[in-house]
Amino acid sequence: MTKNLHVPTTVASRTALQLFMCVVVGMLNMISHDRQCSAKDSDHWASWPSCRWPPKASFQLITYVFLAEASVGSVANKTILRIYGTISGAVAGWLIILITSTAANGTGRDVLITFLTALCLALGQYVKSKKKAYAYMMVMFKLTVILVIIWGWDKDDLDTSFENPYWRIVQVIIGCCMYNASVRLIVPNFDRLKVRQECSRLTSELADAYEKCTAHFVTGNANPPSMQNLLKMQSAINGLIVTTKNAKVEWWFSSEPEKRNPRGEMDGFVVIISALSCCAACMQALRLPFDEAFSTPELLLDKEVTFMRDGFDEMAENFVRALRALSLMLSKPDIKYTGLYSKIRQSRQSFTHSEYLALCDDFRSCLHRTLQMAEKTRVNVLRYVDEVALTEDDIARMVSEVKGKQARGESLDVDGDGDFDADDMALLLTKMLVEQRVTNASSSDDLIRETLRYVSNTRHAARSLQKAKDGLQSVGPLPEGKGYMV
């Protein structure tokens, strides 16, 4: 599990290469402007310089540093937030300067600009704390407000020109466009592929975890996964939700003619990931009974309950098979690469639509059999408990046997202490319990509840996976003749 928490070396190398190329462009802009341009190269500060190099390229370089991420989707998502934050911050800072410039120079103006700046930044921090999705945008907002105030401040005469905010906005937009082009064209790494691959891997790990839990629960022959590993698995599954949000904005890049619409695909994956999260929680519940005592409930070791053990085995077999089918469906990408990228990274061939439908049918039928077997096993457990439980008729029969022995003059002194007392009654009761096939374990309400809870958790996990059926239609191959959204 640990190795999957880190960015792969290949992805890190791609990100470094993309940043290197963009920084080269940014440095070229900055150096060329300083060497070739002058203040008279444009008729107005907002017009493009005749030397063709825009000023303040440092903001372009800073943009590259902030946008350096490992995937196309994460860069695109930060691009949106950065542009919104920069524009809103530039306008807010310029308005503060403009409003303050109307006041007379002196202490009053100083107090006014201090109050407005602090209020603006405080509002940005409030939104950042309340809306985590806009946290990065608010950071850019506050940073830009401070920069605009610094540019416009002068103890004698405030600079109300929009020149500096304008060129910051322009260079940030240039930087965003350049980096998005770089991350898309120079060995791209798509979030939608990561979601598919990680979902497939985590589903396979869930199948392994459940298989081991069942083997240990029924026979004691396998070691269940540690709770730490299960919690890591749950955390990795929940983390994929963030990746799906990034993948939704990958529709910006439409150079793949046979690409499925990422928005619809990621909506399907959200449903699947939510189901996997419920399954991971059930795996943790299955693991809990083994934290203190690594033992199989004696109820299931009883020779008389082979039918129950068979029920557990069949239930587990079908559930694991459903997970394996789901993992296989998610393992192959539905994107065909073209051009340079196809030569650098060879992708596996996608399923045909008919092959995918066959896997879906297997997935659904396995879940259906799992639920049927879970209900049947639950009924068998309750029926067995009823059969071995001590009833009023059993007690009446025991009393009748004691009275019969007393009437025949037989000794009721079971423990040989010379009289009939509570110890003798306890021994007689124990004998009857043995005759009734009640073991020490099966007579425990806790172990019975544990067994039923195990069945209930499996049933809950299977029902959670059933909710993923609709999502699977959004992530599989499209029918022939329908085409792909560009």
Image: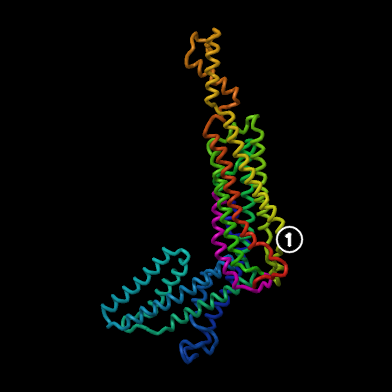
The residue positioned farthest toward the left in the image shown: 107
Crowd band around label 1 with a 10 angstrom C-alpha radius: few (<14), some (14–19), many (20+) = few
Residue 124 horizontal side relative to residue 47, left or right: left
Residue 137 in percent (x, y) is at: 46, 70
Instruction: Please tell me which residue lies in front, 309 or 179.
Output: 309
Q: Is residue 368 above or below residue 146?
A: above
* Residue 468 colored in magenta in the image: no
Residue shown at the point (65%, 61%) measured from the top left: 473
Question: Compared to 368, does 357 lie above or below?
Answer: below
The residue wearing badge 1 is 354
The colour scheme used here is rainbow
Question: Is 358 displayed left or right of 423 in the figure?
Answer: right
On the image, the x and y values in percent for residue 435 come to 60, 22
Residue lying at 32% horizontally and 76% vertically, measured from the top left: 113
Q: Was residue 243 drawn as part of the magenta stretch in this picture?
A: yes
Residue type highlighted by circle 1? Ser
Please report the bounds of the magenta region as a residue range. 231-258
Q: Secondary structure at mark 1?
A: helix
